[in-house]
Image (spheres, rainbow, N blue to C red):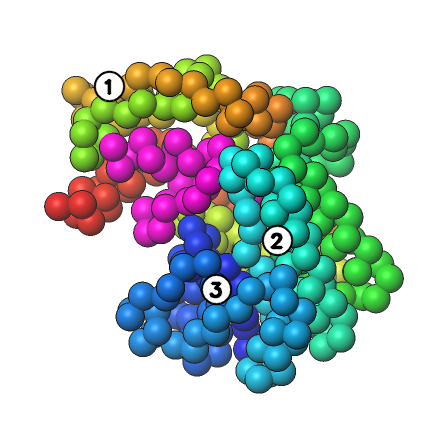
Amino acid sequence: MGKILITGALGQIGSELMITLRKQHGSDNVVVAGHVKAPSEEVLKAGPFETLDATDMEAVVAVVKKHNITTIYHMASILSGTGEKNPQKAWHVNMGGLYNVLEAGRMFNLSLFVPSSIAAFGPTSPMDHTPQDTIQRPTSMYGVTKVAGELLCDYYFLKWGVDVRGLRYPGLISNLTLPGGGTTDYAVEIYYEAIKQKTYSCFLREDTYLDMMYMPDAIEGSIQLMEADPSKLIHRNAFNISAMSFTPKMIAAAIQKYIPDFTITYNIDPVRQGIADSWPNSFDDSAARKEWGWNPKYNLDNMTKDMLDTLSKKLK
Ligand code: AKB
């Protein structure tokens, strides 16, 4: 593999992906890029950084040429909650950035990783064990950009042979960088508040089932897919992947095993509740298991233990 570029590298996924990819390929071979927030001293010292807005086509091409990039992990995106506050911007960033990255892929024969999401489904999709190939009529702007993005990725592969692959991430739980503006963010915030305050006010109803995953599994799955034998891939992009499915009440109970006096209250945000209600409760990820060996390690209990151990040290 040649040089890798990560867009949106300072976000929740990118900041952990860069660490793993740099361990595997060497720091100088992984260029990290972002523009929404300033990079920390640590990021600047760790390896090459570019200030890059993926919606700027010339800038994307310039970075690809400057560093002889051969692979892009395109993580820059506006999430579901923020997307509903400014749908026009969500379309511009999510579709504009993706289009530029796909065009760069076509022009320079790059390999691309493009994430989709549970948001690519909607209220008319089967809610339980949502199949890999089924009805997709999402009702959030974020979801609309995810379905359109999946189709565009398929198109670039079919028309020009661009090696673009991707996963439908469920809600991702992590302890390095906070997510920004998603519907599943509660499942991260709850651990921080459990340590800091021993109580959490949740913006989703207690019985809201959603697919979830711990970040180490998401990082491993993304890299595994990029390294998979292409002749075995029937779907290539937008693979359903899941590790667990739970409700706010269930995650609170999992935390109470370790912090018995932890309490949860509910103050529902109607926008994010509406989005969550339109998303699957649980995925059927058998295509990913069969085509490239997807096999997550974390469930609700071992993730909760790891989150609480890590955050207790971090927030001391
Ligand atoms: C969000 O909640 O918007 C994201 C997602 C599930 O794609 N975390």
SS at badge 2:
helix
User: Is label 1 within 8 A of ligand 1 (CB to nearest ligand atom)?
Assistant: no
Instruction: Tell whether label 3 touches label 1 (CB within 8 Å).
Output: no
Residue 80 showing in the rendered view: no
Kindly identify the amino acid type of the residue bearing the numbered disc 1.
Thr
Q: CA distance from mark 1 to mark 3?
A: 37 Å
Kindly identify the amino acid type of the residue bearing the numbered disc 3.
Gly
Mark 1, residue position: 263
Mark 3, residue position: 34
Question: Which image quadrant for residue 280?
Answer: top right
- Residue at screen point 66% across, 74% down: 58
Label 2: how many residues lie within 10 Å, few (<14), some (14-19) or many (20+)?
many
Label 3: how many residues lie within 10 Å, few (<14), some (14-19) or many (20+)?
many
Label 1: how many residues lie within 10 Å, few (<14), some (14-19) or many (20+)?
some
Residue 182 showing in the rendered view: yes
Comes first in the chain, label 1 or label 3: 3
